[in-house]
Amino acid sequence: MKFETKVIHGGTQEDPYTGAITTPIYQTSTYHQQTLGGHAKYEYTRGENPTRFALESVMAAIENGTDGFAFSSGMAAIHATMSLLKAGDHIVMANDVYGGTFRLVNRILTDLGITFTAVDTADIVALQEAIKPTTKMVYLESPSNPLM
């Protein structure tokens, strides 16, 4: 599919109940369970939601990926991504990241044994010099904060 087609149709399916070709917005918080822990496709909207699944599917199609992930906030996405790191890993990050990002790295991840170096990422030499054998992530934000 071309990009224009992916944006409109990528990853979406006809709604099995109504036949709608655009996914409706499901505003429910819970879904019917046949049994406790019965592993229905949708249990609680914070975990799974057909509307969010449609968005994630379209985003994956647009990016030619297999999966997409949508979060309710930027910090949720940042935390989920950084949770892939393990003790001993190192992050190189911009020295002007959002304060919440800096606090996550400086106050929480360092307690878990993850180290970081904050650099002026506009300085390519400084960026290259900050990379270590243990560096597993180079983290940038755009637009940067607080300079925007």
Image (cartoon, rainbow, N blue to C red):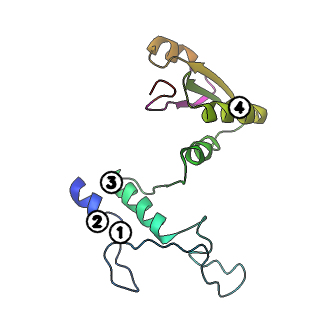
Sequence-wise first label, 4 or 2: 2
Q: CA distance from mark 3 to mark 4?
A: 33 Å
Residue 139 in the image, given as x and y percentages of width and height = 53, 31
* Whether residue 16 is visible: yes
Which mark is on residue 114?
A: 4
Q: CA distance from mark 3 to mark 2?
A: 10 Å
Which mark is on residue 12?
A: 1
Residue 65 in the image, given as x and y percentages of width and height = 39, 53
Which mark is on residue 27?
A: none
In the rendered image of this protein, does residue 60 appear above or below residue 32?
Answer: above
Give the foreground label among 4 and 2: 2
Under mark 4, the amino acid is: Ile
Mark 1 vs 2: CB contact within 8 A = yes
* Whether residue 132 is visible: no
Left/right of residue 21 with respect to residue 71 in the rendered view:
left
Task: Report the residue at 38% width, 55% height from top.
Answer: 59
Q: CA distance from mark 4 to mark 1?
A: 39 Å
Please state the extent of the stretch shown in magenta in the rendering.
131-143
Q: CA distance from mark 1 to mark 2?
A: 6 Å
Give the foreground label among 4 and 1: 1
Which residue is the site of mark 3?
A: 62
**Quadrant for the N terminus in the image:** bottom left
Which residue is the site of mark 2?
A: 9
Give whichever of 124, 19 is nearer the camera: 19
Q: Quadrant of residue 7?
A: bottom left
Under mark 1, the amino acid is: Thr
Sequence-wise first label, 3 or 2: 2
Q: Residues within 10 Å of mark 4 (few under 14, many from 20)?
A: many
